[in-house]
Image (spheres, rainbow, N blue to C red):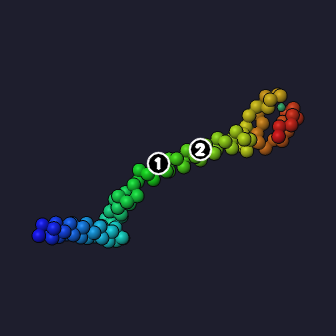
Amino acid sequence: MMNAIATTIVLAGAGMLVGAMIYILKLASDDSANASQLRQFVEVLFNGSSNRQEAAAAEEEEAAHRKRLAEQHGESFAEPCPACGDTVTHENAYCPSCGLRLV
Ligand SMILES: [Zn+2]
């Protein structure tokens, strides 16, 4: 008898959970303005928005790192000529001032 009651309670609880889930998802798939807020809430609930923010920050950092690397590896730079000190860029194969070969 106790088993039957316990099973009934568990089943009722599970059924209510599933029902609430379906209700929220149904509201979230609605296209009203109210639903978009709820959809964000659901997305946070299931995906974790902090994870996405961290991923975006990491991506940004990676892009900045790539840019620094590109500058260091001479894809794009502007620095003084080692011989005469005139500013030369990645577009100059030879120093325009003293003719030193740069690349
Ligand atoms: Zn020079």
Q: In which quarter of the image is the N terminus?
A: bottom left
Task: Return the residue at label 2.
Answer: 64
Classify mark 1: residues with Cα within 10 Å, few (<14), some (14-19) or many (20+): few
Residue 32 in view: no
> Does 57 sit above or below residue 28?
above
Percent from the top left, x then y, of residue 25? 33, 68
Most distant residue in the top direction: 84
Task: Return the residue at label 1.
Answer: 54
Image-quarter location of ligand 1: top right
Q: In which quarter of the image is the C terminus?
A: top right
Q: Residue 83 carries which label?
A: none
Most distant residue in the left direction: 1
Q: Which amino acid does label 1 sit on?
A: Glu
Residue 30 located left or right of residue 57: left
Q: What is the count of numbered marks?
A: 2
> Does 96 sit above or below residue 31?
above
Q: Which of 8 and 13 is in front in this view?
A: 8
Residue at (36% x, 63% y) in the render: 39
Q: Which amino acid does label 2 sit on?
A: Ala
- Identify the secondary structure beneath mark 1: helix
Residue 42 located left or right of residue 65: left
> Does 65 sit above or below residue 44?
above
Q: Image quadrant of residue 42?
A: bottom left
- Identify the secondary structure beneath mark 2: helix
Q: Which of marks 2 and 1 is nearer the N terminus?
A: 1
Percent from the top left, x then y, of residue 40? 37, 60
Residue at (36% x, 70% y) in the render: 29
Residue at (79% x, 32% y) in the render: 81
CA distance for labels 2 and 1? 15 Å
Percent from the top left, x then y, of residue 54? 46, 48
Q: Which of 37 and 8 is in front in this view?
A: 8
